[in-house]
Amino acid sequence: MKGKIFHKIRRAVSQIPKGKVSTYGLLAEACGIKDARLVGWSVWGNKDPKIPCHRIVNKDGYLAEKFSLGGWKEQRKRLENDGVEFSEKKRVNLKKYLFMTKN
């Protein structure tokens, strides 16, 4: 069961365009699941460059403190490389950069 859900989540994450972010909760909702933590679990340690897991932030726009590919500083670096600017040290302006994922 989790394999199908994880595949669906990864497909939704792959839709987030460069320069945008989505939240764990919105991705979960788009995939028809109630537990946003499944989104984090499905992309933890992702090595596939087609799945831009660095584009997922929490509901308030904050980066993942323990981003699996190098912590929040690495996540910030990847987002900055995508053209995303920060309103605070670890926070993305969701009004400007939020992408509403559809699945």
Image (cartoon, grey):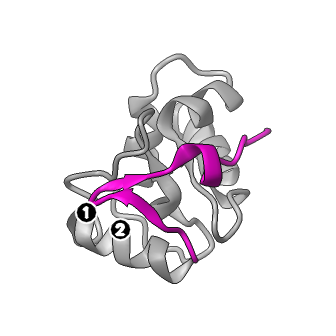
Q: Is residue 63 magenta?
A: no
Image height check: is 84 above or below 82?
Answer: above
Identify the residue at image location x=57%, y=77%.
82
Location of residue 95 (image quadrant):
top right
Identify the residue at image location x=47%, y=71%.
79
Residue hosting label 2: 75
Q: From which residue to which does the magenta span run?
A: 83-103
Q: Which mark is residue 54?
A: none
Identify the residue at image location x=53%, y=16%.
34
Where residue 68 appears, as percent x and y from the top left, is: 27, 62
Where residue 14 appears, as percent x and y from the top left, is: 67, 60
Where residue 3 appears, as percent x and y from the top left, is: 54, 41
Q: 83 or 100, which lies in front?
A: 83
Indicate left or right for 17 with 1 as reference. right
Identify residue type, mark 1.
Trp
At mark 1, the secondary structure is helix
